[in-house]
Image (cartoon, grey):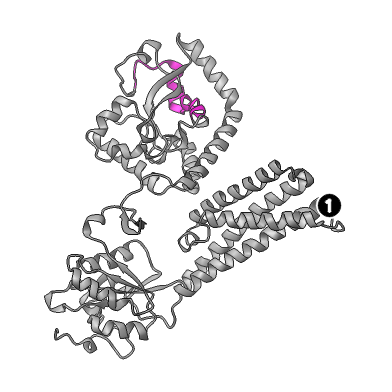
Amino acid sequence: MNNFDPAAVVGKHGEHLPRDAAGDIGSLLKKPRAQSSARYWLPFFINLLKLSDIVVLLFAGFGGFFVRFGLDAKLTPPGHLFIYLSTLVIIVSLHCAQAYREREILSLNSLLSTLGLGFMGGLSLILTVGYLSGTLSEYSRVWVATSACAWFVLLLANRLVLTRVIYRARLANMLDESIIIVGANERAELIVNALKRNGHSNIKVLGIFDDRIERGVPASLLPHILGSTCTMLNYIRSNPVDRVVVALPWLATERVEALLKKLRTVPVRIDLVPNNVVWQFPSINMERLAGVPVLTIANSRIGEQMGRLKRIEDLVISSILLLLVSPVLAICALAVKLDSPGPVIFKQRRHGFNNQEFEVWKFRSMKAGDCASTDVKQATRNDTRITRVGSFLRRSSLDELPQLFNVLFGHMSIVGPRPHAIKHNLEFGAIISEYYARHNVKPGITGWAQVNGFRGETDTLDKMQRRVEHDLHYIEHWSLMLDLKILVMTAFAVWFHKTAY
Protein backbone atom coordinates (compact mmCIF):
# COMPACT_ATOMS: atom_id res chain seq x y z
CA MET A 1 0.00 0.00 0.00
CA ASN A 2 1.44 3.39 -0.92
CA ASN A 3 1.45 6.56 1.18
CA PHE A 4 -0.40 8.65 -1.37
CA ASP A 5 -3.19 10.75 0.15
CA PRO A 6 -6.02 11.34 -2.37
CA ALA A 7 -7.55 13.99 -0.10
CA ALA A 8 -4.56 16.20 -0.78
CA VAL A 9 -5.51 16.32 -4.44
CA VAL A 10 -9.26 15.80 -4.60
CA GLY A 11 -11.72 18.22 -3.06
CA LYS A 12 -15.03 17.42 -1.41
CA HIS A 13 -16.93 17.03 -4.67
CA GLY A 14 -14.13 15.54 -6.74
CA GLU A 15 -12.78 18.82 -8.17
CA HIS A 16 -9.05 19.21 -8.74
CA LEU A 17 -7.63 21.66 -6.23
CA PRO A 18 -4.04 22.33 -7.44
CA ARG A 19 -4.11 23.69 -11.01
CA ASP A 20 -0.93 25.73 -11.19
CA ALA A 21 1.08 22.92 -12.88
CA ALA A 22 -1.64 21.78 -15.23
CA GLY A 23 0.32 22.66 -18.37
CA ASP A 24 -1.24 22.60 -21.81
CA ILE A 25 -3.51 19.60 -21.09
CA GLY A 26 -5.34 21.24 -18.21
CA SER A 27 -8.26 22.32 -20.38
CA LEU A 28 -9.17 18.67 -20.96
CA LEU A 29 -9.28 17.78 -17.28
CA LYS A 30 -12.65 18.97 -16.00
CA LYS A 31 -15.08 18.66 -13.17
CA PRO A 32 -17.66 15.90 -13.67
CA ARG A 33 -20.92 16.98 -15.26
CA ALA A 34 -24.12 17.25 -13.30
CA GLN A 35 -25.51 14.38 -15.38
CA SER A 36 -24.21 11.87 -17.89
CA SER A 37 -25.16 13.50 -21.19
CA ALA A 38 -23.52 11.46 -23.94
CA ARG A 39 -25.10 8.16 -22.88
CA TYR A 40 -28.54 9.76 -22.94
CA TRP A 41 -28.48 12.13 -25.89
CA LEU A 42 -26.82 9.94 -28.55
CA PRO A 43 -29.48 7.17 -28.32
CA PHE A 44 -32.10 9.93 -28.21
CA PHE A 45 -30.87 11.44 -31.49
CA ILE A 46 -30.71 7.99 -33.12
CA ASN A 47 -34.32 7.20 -32.12
CA LEU A 48 -35.37 10.67 -33.26
CA LEU A 49 -33.76 10.07 -36.67
CA LYS A 50 -35.51 6.69 -37.03
CA LEU A 51 -38.90 8.11 -36.09
CA SER A 52 -38.56 11.16 -38.33
CA ASP A 53 -37.41 8.94 -41.25
CA ILE A 54 -40.58 6.85 -40.90
CA VAL A 55 -42.74 10.00 -40.76
CA VAL A 56 -41.17 11.60 -43.87
CA LEU A 57 -41.34 8.34 -45.85
CA LEU A 58 -45.04 8.00 -45.10
CA PHE A 59 -45.59 11.69 -45.84
CA ALA A 60 -43.78 11.37 -49.19
CA GLY A 61 -45.78 8.26 -50.15
CA PHE A 62 -49.15 9.86 -49.43
CA GLY A 63 -47.97 13.20 -50.85
CA GLY A 64 -46.92 11.60 -54.12
CA PHE A 65 -50.37 10.02 -54.47
CA PHE A 66 -52.26 13.27 -53.91
CA VAL A 67 -49.91 15.20 -56.21
CA ARG A 68 -50.75 12.73 -58.98
CA PHE A 69 -54.47 12.21 -58.40
CA GLY A 70 -55.58 15.29 -56.44
CA LEU A 71 -56.76 15.84 -52.88
CA ASP A 72 -60.21 14.41 -53.59
CA ALA A 73 -58.84 11.02 -54.72
CA LYS A 74 -59.37 7.99 -52.49
CA LEU A 75 -56.44 5.74 -51.75
CA THR A 76 -57.26 2.05 -52.21
CA PRO A 77 -56.05 -0.76 -49.86
CA PRO A 78 -53.35 -1.85 -52.37
CA GLY A 79 -52.16 1.78 -52.39
CA HIS A 80 -51.93 1.82 -48.59
CA LEU A 81 -50.01 -1.48 -48.71
CA PHE A 82 -47.54 -0.05 -51.24
CA ILE A 83 -46.80 2.98 -49.04
CA TYR A 84 -46.39 1.00 -45.81
CA LEU A 85 -44.29 -1.78 -47.35
CA SER A 86 -42.07 0.73 -49.18
CA THR A 87 -41.48 2.61 -45.93
CA LEU A 88 -40.59 -0.64 -44.15
CA VAL A 89 -38.21 -1.77 -46.92
CA ILE A 90 -36.31 1.53 -46.98
CA ILE A 91 -36.03 1.70 -43.18
CA VAL A 92 -34.69 -1.88 -43.08
CA SER A 93 -32.28 -1.06 -45.91
CA LEU A 94 -31.02 1.99 -44.01
CA HIS A 95 -30.49 -0.23 -40.97
CA CYS A 96 -28.48 -2.69 -43.09
CA ALA A 97 -26.39 0.23 -44.38
CA GLN A 98 -25.64 1.12 -40.71
CA ALA A 99 -27.32 4.51 -41.04
CA TYR A 100 -28.44 4.47 -37.40
CA ARG A 101 -25.18 3.69 -35.62
CA GLU A 102 -23.89 6.18 -33.05
CA ARG A 103 -20.58 6.58 -34.88
CA GLU A 104 -22.33 7.36 -38.18
CA ILE A 105 -24.68 10.12 -37.00
CA LEU A 106 -21.79 12.21 -35.67
CA SER A 107 -20.34 12.69 -39.17
CA LEU A 108 -22.14 14.33 -42.10
CA ASN A 109 -20.00 12.33 -44.56
CA SER A 110 -21.10 9.07 -42.92
CA LEU A 111 -24.73 10.21 -42.80
CA LEU A 112 -24.75 10.96 -46.53
CA SER A 113 -22.84 7.81 -47.51
CA THR A 114 -25.11 5.48 -45.53
CA LEU A 115 -28.17 7.34 -46.81
CA GLY A 116 -27.09 6.87 -50.43
CA LEU A 117 -26.33 3.18 -49.95
CA GLY A 118 -29.47 2.44 -47.89
CA PHE A 119 -31.84 4.40 -50.09
CA MET A 120 -30.55 3.02 -53.40
CA GLY A 121 -30.64 -0.51 -51.99
CA GLY A 122 -34.21 -0.12 -50.72
CA LEU A 123 -35.49 1.55 -53.88
CA SER A 124 -33.83 -1.07 -56.10
CA LEU A 125 -35.47 -3.84 -54.08
CA ILE A 126 -38.91 -2.18 -54.30
CA LEU A 127 -38.69 -1.71 -58.08
CA THR A 128 -37.22 -5.18 -58.71
CA VAL A 129 -39.82 -7.04 -56.62
CA GLY A 130 -42.61 -4.89 -58.07
CA TYR A 131 -41.48 -5.59 -61.62
CA LEU A 132 -40.97 -9.34 -61.15
CA SER A 133 -44.32 -9.76 -59.36
CA GLY A 134 -46.17 -7.65 -61.92
CA THR A 135 -47.67 -5.43 -59.21
CA LEU A 136 -45.66 -2.35 -60.18
CA SER A 137 -47.80 -1.85 -63.28
CA GLU A 138 -50.84 -1.38 -61.03
CA TYR A 139 -49.48 1.91 -59.74
CA SER A 140 -49.06 5.21 -61.54
CA ARG A 141 -45.49 5.78 -62.73
CA VAL A 142 -45.83 9.49 -61.91
CA TRP A 143 -46.91 8.60 -58.36
CA VAL A 144 -44.00 6.17 -57.84
CA ALA A 145 -41.44 8.58 -59.35
CA THR A 146 -42.75 11.56 -57.35
CA SER A 147 -42.72 9.55 -54.13
CA ALA A 148 -39.20 8.25 -54.78
CA CYS A 149 -37.85 11.77 -55.34
CA ALA A 150 -39.66 13.03 -52.26
CA TRP A 151 -38.33 10.11 -50.19
CA PHE A 152 -34.73 10.97 -50.99
CA VAL A 153 -35.09 14.75 -50.64
CA LEU A 154 -36.86 14.48 -47.27
CA LEU A 155 -34.46 11.86 -45.93
CA LEU A 156 -31.58 14.11 -46.97
CA ALA A 157 -33.23 17.15 -45.34
CA ASN A 158 -33.72 15.06 -42.21
CA ARG A 159 -29.99 14.43 -41.96
CA LEU A 160 -29.03 18.02 -42.66
CA VAL A 161 -31.36 19.16 -39.87
CA LEU A 162 -29.98 16.48 -37.54
CA THR A 163 -26.41 17.61 -38.30
CA ARG A 164 -27.37 21.14 -37.28
CA VAL A 165 -29.06 19.89 -34.10
CA ILE A 166 -25.99 17.79 -33.19
CA TYR A 167 -23.75 20.80 -33.82
CA ARG A 168 -25.81 22.88 -31.38
CA ALA A 169 -25.84 19.99 -28.91
CA ARG A 170 -22.05 19.87 -29.02
CA LEU A 171 -21.85 23.62 -28.34
CA ALA A 172 -24.19 23.14 -25.38
CA ASN A 173 -21.98 20.29 -24.05
CA MET A 174 -24.91 17.89 -24.34
CA LEU A 175 -22.71 15.29 -26.02
CA ASP A 176 -19.79 15.58 -23.61
CA GLU A 177 -18.33 12.23 -22.61
CA SER A 178 -16.60 12.04 -19.23
CA ILE A 179 -13.76 9.55 -18.88
CA ILE A 180 -11.20 8.56 -16.26
CA ILE A 181 -7.82 6.99 -16.98
CA VAL A 182 -6.20 4.21 -14.98
CA GLY A 183 -2.42 4.40 -15.08
CA ALA A 184 -0.44 7.62 -14.61
CA ASN A 185 2.19 6.89 -17.22
CA GLU A 186 3.43 7.94 -20.65
CA ARG A 187 0.45 6.20 -22.28
CA ALA A 188 -1.99 8.32 -20.31
CA GLU A 189 -0.05 11.45 -21.26
CA LEU A 190 -0.18 10.43 -24.94
CA ILE A 191 -3.94 9.84 -24.73
CA VAL A 192 -4.64 13.25 -23.19
CA ASN A 193 -2.35 15.03 -25.64
CA ALA A 194 -3.96 13.16 -28.56
CA LEU A 195 -7.43 14.24 -27.42
CA LYS A 196 -6.27 17.84 -27.30
CA ARG A 197 -4.40 17.69 -30.61
CA ASN A 198 -7.26 16.03 -32.53
CA GLY A 199 -9.89 18.46 -31.29
CA HIS A 200 -12.02 16.04 -29.27
CA SER A 201 -13.55 18.85 -27.21
CA ASN A 202 -16.55 16.70 -26.28
CA ILE A 203 -14.35 14.25 -24.34
CA LYS A 204 -13.52 15.41 -20.81
CA VAL A 205 -10.88 13.63 -18.74
CA LEU A 206 -12.08 13.82 -15.14
CA GLY A 207 -8.79 12.58 -13.76
CA ILE A 208 -6.37 9.69 -13.34
CA PHE A 209 -6.12 6.81 -10.87
CA ASP A 210 -2.97 4.84 -10.11
CA ASP A 211 -1.64 2.65 -7.28
CA ARG A 212 2.04 3.24 -7.94
CA ILE A 213 2.53 6.99 -7.74
CA GLU A 214 5.86 6.59 -5.96
CA ARG A 215 7.41 5.02 -9.09
CA GLY A 216 7.25 8.31 -10.96
CA VAL A 217 4.51 10.18 -12.81
CA PRO A 218 4.83 12.53 -15.80
CA ALA A 219 4.88 16.07 -14.44
CA SER A 220 1.90 17.19 -16.53
CA LEU A 221 -0.32 14.46 -14.99
CA LEU A 222 0.65 14.79 -11.33
CA PRO A 223 -1.85 17.57 -10.43
CA HIS A 224 -4.72 15.46 -11.80
CA ILE A 225 -4.25 12.24 -9.85
CA LEU A 226 -7.56 11.45 -8.13
CA GLY A 227 -6.30 8.58 -6.01
CA SER A 228 -5.59 4.87 -6.04
CA THR A 229 -7.74 2.21 -7.67
CA CYS A 230 -9.12 1.42 -4.21
CA THR A 231 -11.01 4.73 -4.25
CA MET A 232 -11.89 4.49 -7.95
CA LEU A 233 -15.09 2.43 -7.62
CA ASN A 234 -16.57 4.84 -5.09
CA TYR A 235 -15.66 7.75 -7.36
CA ILE A 236 -17.43 6.10 -10.32
CA ARG A 237 -20.55 5.41 -8.26
CA SER A 238 -20.75 9.00 -6.99
CA ASN A 239 -19.88 10.79 -10.25
CA PRO A 240 -21.27 10.52 -13.80
CA VAL A 241 -18.44 8.63 -15.54
CA ASP A 242 -19.10 7.40 -19.09
CA ARG A 243 -15.91 5.48 -19.74
CA VAL A 244 -12.84 4.08 -17.99
CA VAL A 245 -9.66 3.87 -20.09
CA VAL A 246 -7.13 1.38 -18.71
CA ALA A 247 -3.66 2.51 -19.82
CA LEU A 248 -1.66 -0.06 -17.85
CA PRO A 249 0.94 -2.11 -19.75
CA TRP A 250 -0.34 -5.52 -20.84
CA LEU A 251 2.76 -7.18 -19.43
CA ALA A 252 1.29 -6.63 -15.95
CA THR A 253 -1.23 -9.40 -16.66
CA GLU A 254 -2.32 -10.21 -13.11
CA ARG A 255 -2.66 -6.55 -12.19
CA VAL A 256 -4.75 -5.76 -15.28
CA GLU A 257 -7.00 -8.82 -14.82
CA ALA A 258 -7.70 -7.95 -11.18
CA LEU A 259 -8.49 -4.36 -12.14
CA LEU A 260 -10.88 -5.39 -14.93
CA LYS A 261 -12.77 -7.68 -12.55
CA LYS A 262 -13.22 -4.71 -10.21
CA LEU A 263 -14.43 -2.43 -12.97
CA ARG A 264 -17.01 -4.92 -14.25
CA THR A 265 -18.96 -4.38 -11.01
CA VAL A 266 -19.86 -0.79 -11.96
CA PRO A 267 -22.12 0.34 -14.87
CA VAL A 268 -19.49 1.96 -17.05
CA ARG A 269 -17.80 1.30 -20.40
CA ILE A 270 -14.28 -0.10 -20.06
CA ASP A 271 -11.59 0.38 -22.71
CA LEU A 272 -8.18 -1.30 -22.65
CA VAL A 273 -5.36 0.60 -24.38
CA PRO A 274 -3.43 -1.88 -26.61
CA ASN A 275 0.28 -2.53 -26.70
CA ASN A 276 2.45 0.16 -28.26
CA VAL A 277 3.15 -2.00 -31.33
CA VAL A 278 -0.35 -1.42 -32.72
CA TRP A 279 -0.44 2.34 -32.11
CA GLN A 280 1.22 3.04 -35.45
CA PHE A 281 -1.73 1.58 -37.37
CA PRO A 282 -4.52 4.09 -38.09
CA SER A 283 -7.55 1.77 -38.16
CA ILE A 284 -7.93 -0.94 -35.50
CA ASN A 285 -11.18 -2.77 -34.81
CA MET A 286 -12.05 -5.53 -32.38
CA GLU A 287 -13.84 -8.54 -33.79
CA ARG A 288 -14.35 -12.17 -32.81
CA LEU A 289 -13.05 -15.07 -34.86
CA ALA A 290 -14.92 -18.25 -33.84
CA GLY A 291 -15.53 -16.60 -30.47
CA VAL A 292 -11.88 -15.58 -30.00
CA PRO A 293 -11.31 -11.78 -29.74
CA VAL A 294 -8.94 -10.42 -32.37
CA LEU A 295 -7.68 -6.94 -33.20
CA THR A 296 -8.02 -5.94 -36.85
CA ILE A 297 -4.84 -3.97 -37.47
CA ALA A 298 -5.57 -3.06 -41.09
CA ASN A 299 -8.32 -3.56 -43.62
CA SER A 300 -7.01 -1.32 -46.37
CA ARG A 301 -9.84 -1.73 -48.82
CA ILE A 302 -13.24 -0.13 -49.22
CA GLY A 303 -15.88 -2.32 -47.55
CA GLU A 304 -18.17 -4.50 -49.65
CA GLN A 305 -21.27 -2.37 -49.11
CA MET A 306 -19.42 0.89 -49.70
CA GLY A 307 -17.79 -0.75 -52.72
CA ARG A 308 -21.19 -1.33 -54.29
CA LEU A 309 -22.10 2.30 -53.69
CA LYS A 310 -18.81 3.40 -55.28
CA ARG A 311 -19.51 1.16 -58.29
CA ILE A 312 -22.94 2.79 -58.71
CA GLU A 313 -21.21 6.17 -58.50
CA ASP A 314 -18.73 5.11 -61.21
CA LEU A 315 -21.44 3.80 -63.55
CA VAL A 316 -23.61 6.90 -63.18
CA ILE A 317 -20.80 9.45 -63.55
CA SER A 318 -18.98 7.65 -66.39
CA SER A 319 -22.22 7.16 -68.36
CA ILE A 320 -23.21 10.81 -67.99
CA LEU A 321 -19.72 12.04 -68.88
CA LEU A 322 -19.49 9.79 -71.95
CA LEU A 323 -22.77 11.22 -73.23
CA LEU A 324 -21.67 14.80 -72.55
CA VAL A 325 -18.14 14.53 -73.98
CA SER A 326 -18.85 12.26 -76.94
CA PRO A 327 -18.34 15.19 -79.40
CA VAL A 328 -15.04 16.01 -77.66
CA LEU A 329 -13.97 12.37 -77.94
CA ALA A 330 -14.66 12.44 -81.68
CA ILE A 331 -12.76 15.72 -82.18
CA CYS A 332 -9.76 14.48 -80.18
CA ALA A 333 -9.68 11.20 -82.08
CA LEU A 334 -9.76 13.03 -85.43
CA ALA A 335 -7.02 15.44 -84.29
CA VAL A 336 -4.73 12.60 -83.18
CA LYS A 337 -5.27 10.76 -86.49
CA LEU A 338 -4.54 13.84 -88.64
CA ASP A 339 -1.55 14.99 -86.55
CA SER A 340 0.66 11.91 -86.91
CA PRO A 341 0.49 8.38 -88.29
CA GLY A 342 -0.41 5.58 -85.93
CA PRO A 343 -3.35 4.33 -83.83
CA VAL A 344 -5.69 6.81 -82.15
CA ILE A 345 -5.82 4.89 -78.88
CA PHE A 346 -2.71 4.06 -76.85
CA LYS A 347 -3.06 0.86 -74.81
CA GLN A 348 -0.76 -0.24 -72.01
CA ARG A 349 -0.84 -3.04 -69.43
CA ARG A 350 -1.02 -1.74 -65.87
CA HIS A 351 -1.77 -3.08 -62.41
CA GLY A 352 -5.29 -2.66 -61.09
CA PHE A 353 -7.15 -3.90 -58.02
CA ASN A 354 -5.17 -6.55 -56.10
CA ASN A 355 -2.29 -6.25 -58.61
CA GLN A 356 -4.42 -7.74 -61.40
CA GLU A 357 -3.31 -6.54 -64.83
CA PHE A 358 -5.63 -4.68 -67.17
CA GLU A 359 -5.25 -2.61 -70.34
CA VAL A 360 -5.57 1.14 -69.79
CA TRP A 361 -6.77 3.33 -72.67
CA LYS A 362 -5.57 6.82 -73.54
CA PHE A 363 -5.49 9.00 -76.63
CA ARG A 364 -2.07 8.55 -78.21
CA SER A 365 0.03 11.62 -77.37
CA MET A 366 3.43 10.37 -78.55
CA LYS A 367 4.83 9.34 -81.90
CA ALA A 368 3.79 5.82 -82.83
CA GLY A 369 7.34 4.42 -82.73
CA ASP A 370 8.00 5.79 -79.25
CA CYS A 371 4.69 4.43 -77.96
CA ALA A 372 5.64 0.95 -79.15
CA SER A 373 9.03 1.05 -77.40
CA THR A 374 9.51 -1.52 -74.64
CA ASP A 375 11.57 1.01 -72.65
CA VAL A 376 8.88 2.64 -70.47
CA LYS A 377 10.00 6.15 -69.61
CA GLN A 378 7.93 8.86 -67.92
CA ALA A 379 7.16 11.95 -69.98
CA THR A 380 9.29 14.99 -69.10
CA ARG A 381 9.09 18.70 -69.89
CA ASN A 382 9.87 19.40 -73.58
CA ASP A 383 9.82 15.66 -74.31
CA THR A 384 10.61 15.20 -78.02
CA ARG A 385 8.46 12.07 -78.21
CA ILE A 386 5.24 14.05 -77.65
CA THR A 387 3.32 15.23 -80.73
CA ARG A 388 1.83 18.71 -81.15
CA VAL A 389 -1.73 17.52 -80.52
CA GLY A 390 -0.46 15.20 -77.80
CA SER A 391 1.11 18.11 -75.94
CA PHE A 392 -2.25 19.89 -75.75
CA LEU A 393 -4.10 16.71 -74.81
CA ARG A 394 -1.68 15.99 -71.96
CA ARG A 395 -1.74 19.54 -70.56
CA SER A 396 -5.54 19.57 -70.56
CA SER A 397 -5.82 15.90 -69.45
CA LEU A 398 -8.07 15.20 -72.45
CA ASP A 399 -5.83 12.24 -73.27
CA GLU A 400 -7.35 10.49 -70.21
CA LEU A 401 -10.95 10.64 -71.52
CA PRO A 402 -10.94 7.10 -73.06
CA GLN A 403 -10.42 5.79 -69.52
CA LEU A 404 -14.13 6.48 -68.97
CA PHE A 405 -14.59 3.21 -70.89
CA ASN A 406 -12.20 1.52 -68.44
CA VAL A 407 -14.47 2.76 -65.66
CA LEU A 408 -17.59 1.56 -67.46
CA PHE A 409 -16.05 -1.91 -67.96
CA GLY A 410 -15.10 -2.11 -64.25
CA HIS A 411 -11.29 -1.98 -64.60
CA MET A 412 -11.02 1.48 -63.05
CA SER A 413 -12.91 3.95 -60.89
CA ILE A 414 -13.57 7.65 -61.48
CA VAL A 415 -11.59 8.49 -58.33
CA GLY A 416 -8.71 6.42 -56.96
CA PRO A 417 -4.92 6.04 -57.06
CA ARG A 418 -3.55 6.61 -60.56
CA PRO A 419 -2.30 3.40 -62.24
CA HIS A 420 1.40 3.36 -63.07
CA ALA A 421 3.22 1.41 -65.73
CA ILE A 422 4.11 -2.10 -64.54
CA LYS A 423 7.84 -1.39 -64.83
CA HIS A 424 7.51 1.63 -62.53
CA ASN A 425 5.40 -0.42 -60.09
CA LEU A 426 8.16 -3.01 -59.81
CA GLU A 427 10.82 -0.33 -59.32
CA PHE A 428 9.02 1.71 -56.64
CA GLY A 429 7.41 -1.34 -55.01
CA ALA A 430 10.88 -2.66 -54.22
CA ILE A 431 11.91 0.47 -52.28
CA ILE A 432 8.63 1.83 -50.79
CA SER A 433 7.27 -0.63 -48.24
CA GLU A 434 3.57 0.25 -48.53
CA TYR A 435 3.58 0.98 -52.27
CA TYR A 436 1.39 -1.95 -53.29
CA ALA A 437 -1.28 -0.94 -50.76
CA ARG A 438 -2.37 1.49 -53.49
CA HIS A 439 -3.80 -1.54 -55.29
CA ASN A 440 -6.25 -2.38 -52.49
CA VAL A 441 -8.84 -0.41 -54.49
CA LYS A 442 -9.44 0.11 -58.19
CA PRO A 443 -7.18 2.73 -59.80
CA GLY A 444 -8.80 6.02 -60.77
CA ILE A 445 -8.80 8.62 -63.51
CA THR A 446 -8.14 11.26 -60.86
CA GLY A 447 -7.18 10.97 -57.22
CA TRP A 448 -6.32 12.66 -53.92
CA ALA A 449 -2.62 12.78 -54.82
CA GLN A 450 -3.29 14.44 -58.17
CA VAL A 451 -5.43 17.28 -56.78
CA ASN A 452 -2.79 17.94 -54.12
CA GLY A 453 -0.05 18.63 -56.64
CA PHE A 454 1.40 15.14 -57.15
CA ARG A 455 0.44 14.89 -60.80
CA GLY A 456 2.64 14.16 -63.77
CA GLU A 457 6.31 13.20 -63.57
CA THR A 458 7.64 11.65 -60.35
CA ASP A 459 11.37 12.06 -60.90
CA THR A 460 12.41 11.60 -57.26
CA LEU A 461 11.75 8.98 -54.60
CA ASP A 462 10.36 11.65 -52.27
CA LYS A 463 7.69 12.65 -54.82
CA MET A 464 6.56 9.05 -55.22
CA GLN A 465 6.58 8.55 -51.44
CA ARG A 466 4.32 11.58 -51.02
CA ARG A 467 2.03 10.34 -53.78
CA VAL A 468 1.74 6.96 -52.05
CA GLU A 469 0.96 8.67 -48.71
CA HIS A 470 -1.87 10.64 -50.32
CA ASP A 471 -3.23 7.52 -52.05
CA LEU A 472 -3.30 5.59 -48.75
CA HIS A 473 -4.99 8.53 -47.03
CA TYR A 474 -7.72 8.37 -49.68
CA ILE A 475 -8.25 4.63 -49.21
CA GLU A 476 -8.48 4.94 -45.42
CA HIS A 477 -10.84 7.94 -45.47
CA TRP A 478 -12.98 7.20 -48.52
CA SER A 479 -16.52 8.59 -48.70
CA LEU A 480 -18.85 9.83 -51.42
CA MET A 481 -18.31 13.38 -50.22
CA LEU A 482 -14.52 12.97 -50.56
CA ASP A 483 -15.00 11.70 -54.15
CA LEU A 484 -17.16 14.72 -55.02
CA LYS A 485 -14.60 17.04 -53.42
CA ILE A 486 -11.82 15.48 -55.51
CA LEU A 487 -13.86 15.81 -58.71
CA VAL A 488 -14.42 19.53 -58.04
CA MET A 489 -10.73 20.02 -57.19
CA THR A 490 -9.76 18.15 -60.37
CA ALA A 491 -11.47 20.75 -62.52
CA PHE A 492 -9.24 23.43 -61.00
CA ALA A 493 -6.12 21.26 -60.99
CA VAL A 494 -6.41 20.56 -64.71
CA TRP A 495 -6.36 24.23 -65.64
CA PHE A 496 -4.13 25.75 -62.98
CA HIS A 497 -1.54 23.06 -62.17
CA LYS A 498 1.33 22.87 -64.64
CA THR A 499 2.89 19.57 -63.57
CA ALA A 500 1.45 17.55 -66.48
CA TYR A 501 3.27 17.58 -69.82
Q: Which residues are magenta?
A: 382-406
At x 56% / y 52%, what residue is drawn?
Answer: 118
Q: Confirm whether the magenta stretch covers residue 250.
A: no
In x, y percent, where is residue 23?
24, 72
As displayed, is residue 264 above or below residue 499? below
In x, y percent, where is residue 94?
56, 55
The one nearer the camera, 304 or 164, is 304
Do we see residue 15 in this rendering? no
What is the quadrant of the N terminus in the image? bottom left
At x 36% / y 41%, what residue is drawn?
Answer: 471
As displayed, is residue 487 above or below residue 76? above
At x 17% / y 85%, what residue is drawn?
Answer: 4
Do we see residue 489 in this rendering? yes
Indicate left or right for 142 with 388 as reference. Answer: right
Q: Which image quadrant is residue 60 in?
A: bottom right
At x 64% / y 52%, what residue is drawn?
Answer: 152
What is the quadrant of the C terminus in the image? top left
Q: Amino acid at mark 1?
A: Phe
Q: Confirm whether the magenta stretch covers residue 401.
A: yes
As displayed, is residue 59 above or below residue 3? above
The one nearer the camera, 94 or 421, is 94
